[in-house]
Amino acid sequence: MIDPVPLHAGPPGSGVVPLIDRFARSITYLRLSVTDRCDLRCSYCMPERMQFLPRAEVLALEELYTAARAFMARGVRKIRLTGGEPLVRRDMVDLVTALGRHIGTDLDELTMTTNGTRLAEFAEPLAQAGVRRINVSLDTLDRARFAQLARRDMLDAVLAGIAAARDAGIAVKINTVALKGINEHEIADLVAWAHGQGHAMTLIEVMPLGEVEGDRFDHYLPLDGVRRDLEQRWTLVPNAQRSGGPARYVDIAETGGRLGFITPLTGNFCEGCNRVRMTATGQLYMCLGGEGQVDLRAALRGPDPETALNAAFARAMGEKPERHAFAITGPGGAPTLARHMSVTGG
């Protein structure tokens, strides 16, 4: 049971104001990381010997819930729980249940991004808590290739989790990182499989976050070329749907399914950004591709959380950049940012 730290939004005029950045963009979407830990070690995401954060630095579930309430009071209507892998955190369902009680009042939607390895166990509790959509990361349907990429032989667990989510009534979207020389020849088959299972799918360009053992440039696959290849096989019809994130969608006439493209490197998508990210340690990042951060943990744990949070949010809105700074410069180039995706929240 979540026992939140006392925090009151207050009546109009109390000093709690909506989150609007200096470019007049309203922030209505929070990606809330609950842990940096993961039970996979995907080669493009982290090294095999990943150094995770000390557990003492990670916010308690009650603090995460309190922070989420503070965002809701300031106009956030959608929360996506992320990691690392959110379902490896103990008692995670308690947080989902507590947040789920706000759906229909303070929240329009509560979602999650997961690698799916523990989804078979948790799909039904997530559905009961009000989760109606999830994203599942899946880069290949080939067992040997999955084990090579994830450094763990867990494809069967992921596929069982996806099936369990579907059976629980949760809509699944498959997220696939397009990787040159690894899964590029499998992408069309992945799309056909996902659509055949009734799942939407989104393709993502590899993001240069954190040091990994290989060179990301070797596996960088621009999605404009992938899209041209898919157009040789299928009819792609642009779709104006927006899910709150950066994806741009098409419908595929022959499969009857939807396909998204997230292009941090070949196509900037920042003009309508409505998102911020909070890490499991309470650091608020205004942009996944930027260094700027504001410490909400200190505000939450201080003597006057509401005043401190107001000041922290005001600073964050003043510092949110107009666009990200992602780039892959060439072979051997350093990542754009030193921190790994699992630290910020995927």
Image (cartoon, rainbow, N blue to C red):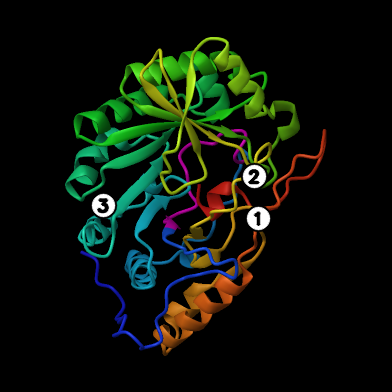
Residue at 50 percent of width and 78 percent of height? 298
Cα distance in 3D space between marks 1 and 2: 8 Å
Q: Is 127 situated above or below 184?
A: below
The magenta span reads: 30-46
Are discs 1 and 2 less than 8 Å apart at CB? yes
| Residue 157, magenta (yes or no) | no
First of labels 1, 3 by sequence position: 3
The residue beneath circle 3 is 93
Q: Residues within 10 Å of mark 3 (few under 14, many from 20)?
A: some
The residue beneath circle 2 is 268
Magenta stretch, overall SS: loop
Q: Is 312 situated above or below 90?
A: below
Task: Name the image quarter holding residue 163.
Answer: top left
Quarter of the picture containing the N terminus is bottom left
Local SS, label 2:
loop
The residue beneath circle 1 is 323
Cα distance in 3D space between marks 3 and 2: 35 Å
